[in-house]
């Protein structure tokens, strides 16, 4: 519920969820009220790891109806540091100025924050996980937002010549006008270890089919080292959400919307990410 409620709260009008579960019924039951209120569409996507075709299907089916299309996983939260809605942030960043516009957002990877298991039922992920890397992930930007209201049937989900997934970056694409967004304006908090020390086990159990092939690295990772992964900086920016939005964990669609920007913990230093070259960065984080 947290992820769905949060995205509606920051201004997304509609969320399309591709559900990989063998049995789609439990998720459909949980989100029934959101589907009824037209906040959510659920598509049962049986092919595990098939991100490219799921995203292609979603982009081609829904992209022409949406002002913008943002690719996100369930462990990724967009953080608005200077704006209170995604629409205002995207407008400020120029997303609506070009039909081929694309915004590249940087990931801030969060660790298990010393926890062995997932959060208790009444505790949000954003409250539970508060330790992260001091700098963003720099091999490539984390996720993208595209200008919508156009036909995407000729858009290649895997770009040429580098075969980069569109959902991770537009930076090497000739068919998009790409902008790398300042991490202190908009960032994506990536809670990939939200199940605590069990996160590695879950990733291995999920398998390595199709677009999950790069997840093999977790099979070779020493689980005893997990507490130290991306654990350098304490960041409580998102831990304050429930003081603004008490309905965050409730299974009831809320009309409440975010009213002020988040008080983001600043990332200091220069972000450099150059197409064709692995990025480098030196930075420190301070309140």
Image (tube, helix red, strand yellow):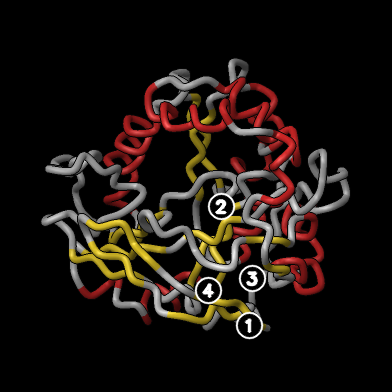
Look at mark 4 in the image and give the residue it sits on: 85
**Count of picture labels:** 4
Instruction: Specify which label sits upstream in the sequence, 2 or 3.
Output: 2
Look at mark 3 in the image and give the residue it sits on: 257
Q: Nearer the viewer, residue 199 or 173?
A: 199
Q: CA distance from mark 1 to mark 4?
A: 8 Å
Q: Nearer the viewer, mark 2 or mark 3?
A: 2
Q: CA distance from mark 3 to mark 4?
A: 8 Å
Whole-percent x and y of residue 210? 38, 23
Q: Where 44 falls versus 273 (above or below)? A: above
Residue at figure coordinates x 24%, y 57% from the top left: 277
Look at mark 2 in the image and give the residue it sits on: 76
Q: Which dot marks residue 260?
A: 1
> Which quadrant would residue 132 be assigned to in this image?
bottom right
> In the drawing, does residue 61 fall left or right of residue 201?
left
Disc 4 element = loop
Instruction: Specify which label sits upstream in the sequence, 1 or 2.
Output: 2
Q: Nearer the viewer, mark 2 or mark 4?
A: 2
Answer few, some or many: residues within 10 Å of disc 1's Cα (few below 14, many 20 plus, some between 14 and 19).
some
Q: CA distance from mark 1 to mark 2?
A: 20 Å
Instruction: Specify which label sits upstream in the sequence, 1 or 4.
Output: 4
Q: Are marks 3 and 4 in contact (CB under 8 Å)?
A: yes
């Amino acid at each position: 519920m947290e992820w769905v409620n949060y995205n509606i709260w920051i201004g997304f009008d509609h969320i399309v969820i591709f559900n990989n579960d063998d049995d789609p019924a439990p998720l459909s039951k949980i989100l029934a009220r959101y589907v009824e209120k037209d906040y959510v569409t659920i598509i049962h996507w049986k092919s595990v790891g098939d991100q490219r075709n799921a995203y292609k299907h979603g982009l081609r089916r829904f992209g022409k109806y949406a002002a913008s299309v943002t690719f996100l996983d369930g462990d990724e939260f967009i953080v608005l540091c200077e704006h209170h809605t995604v629409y205002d942030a995207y407008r400020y960043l120029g997303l609506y100025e070009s039909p081929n516009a694309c915004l590249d957002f940087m990931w801030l990877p969060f660790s298990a924050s010393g926890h062995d298991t997932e959060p208790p039922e009444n505790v949000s992920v954003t409250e539970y996980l508060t330790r992260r890397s001091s700098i963003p992930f720099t091999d490539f930007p984390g996720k993208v937002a595209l200008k919508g209201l156009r036909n995407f049937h000729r858009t290649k989900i895997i770009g040429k010549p580098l075969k980069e997934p569109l959902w991770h970056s537009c930076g090497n694409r000739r068919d998009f006008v790409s902008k790398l967004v300042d991490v202190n304006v908009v960032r994506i908090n990536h809670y990939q270890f939200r199940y605590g020390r069990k996160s590695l086990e879950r990733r291995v159990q999920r398998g390595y089919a199709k677009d999950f092939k790069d997840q093999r690295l977790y099979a070779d990772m020493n689980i005893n080292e997990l507490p130290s992964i991306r654990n350098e900086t304490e960041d409580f920016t998102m831990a304050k959400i429930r003081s603004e939005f008490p309905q965050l964990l409730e299974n009831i669609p809320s009309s409440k919307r975010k009213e002020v920007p988040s008080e983001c913990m600043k990332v200091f230093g220069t972000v450099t990410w150059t197409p064709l070259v692995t990025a480098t960065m030196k930075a420190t984080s301070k309140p």
